[in-house]
Amino acid sequence: MTKLSVNINKIATLRNARGGNLPDVTRAALDCERFGAQGITVHPRPDERHIRYSDVRTIRPLVSTEFNIEGNPIESFRDLVLEVVPDQVTLVPDAHDAITSNAGWDVLRNREFLTQMCSLFHTKGIRVSIFIDPLPEMAVAAKECGADRVELYTEAYSAQYAAGPEKAIAPYLQTAHAARQAGLGLNAGHDLNLENLAYFVKTIPWTDEVSIGHAIICDALYMGLEKTIAAYRACLV
């Protein structure tokens, strides 16, 4: 069954908007686990506008499910990951001023760098996932770099879903097949929600994990966090 990893960045964004420690990001992470999340995802950025490096250090020893750190592997990020040793690191090519992740890696053009990153994180026994657009050749190249998984960037799928699910998911299904044939695990994330998630995992049932943050926090404003996580888990059955 596909696992649900909850990205808690938006909880940190709310805390940082006011200062202080409300909402408590650490408590939120543990509550997500208690309510059924099978993993916690954080995406620290250099400006620390949401999750801070200090949050990562505090949360890591307390998480009992899978801990996933995603981000652009600049030097400070690499040092943090090697220090806290998450279960998984997801390499994302976002610029320092990006509002949110907006593209996958061109793995072919960055093959040497990504190979070095996979090798580096493997020295600590960390599973490495590379964030890619739905292009089969990128999945194959990620395997050649030494990655363990790829994460499909699902913004286009989510944007096109209402106009036609089959057409929207077609390039993702093709890339998912390429990843499986290459021997890679498969993750997915970005703009997945209660409307489009079930169809995605039904069509690509070998998806190992989905990472969802923004939509879960938005739904939790109305449904509450516990019921929201249960609703997302129900989509993955």
Image (spheres, rainbow, N blue to C red):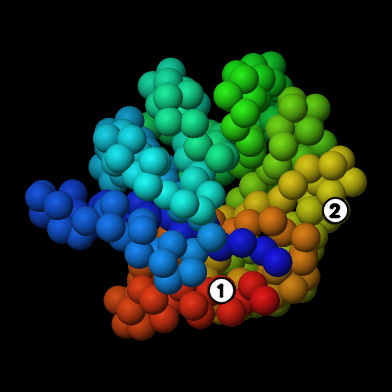
Q: Which mark is residue 233?
A: 1
Task: Residue 49: give x, y in percent of width and height.
Answer: 26, 42
Q: How many neighbours does mark 1 have within 10 angstroms: few (below 14), some (14-19), or many (20 or more)?
A: many
> Visible in this render: residue 234?
yes
Query: Is label 2 in a helix, a strand or a loop?
Result: helix
Q: How many neighbours does mark 2 have within 10 angstroms: few (below 14), some (14-19), or many (20 or more)?
A: some
- The quarter of the rendered structure image containing the C terminus is bottom right
**Which amino acid does the dot numbered 1 rest on?**
Arg
Asked whether 231 or 215 is in front, the reply is: 231
Q: Which mark is residue 177?
A: 2
Asked whether 144 or 84 is in front, the reply is: 84
At a point 14% along the width and 52% down the height, the residue shown is 21
Give the mark, 1 or 2, whose residue is nearer the N terminus: 2
Q: Is residue 220 left or right of residue 133?
A: left
Question: Real-space Cα distance between discs 1 and 2?
Answer: 24 Å
Task: Residue 81: give x, y in percent of width and height.
Answer: 46, 29
Q: Is residue 74 left or right of residue 2?
A: left
Give above or below for 201 relative to 234.
above
Give above or below for 224 relative to 170.
below
At a point 27% along the width and 35% down the height, the residue shown is 54
Q: Which mark is residue 118?
A: none
Q: Is residue 31 left or right of residue 194?
A: left
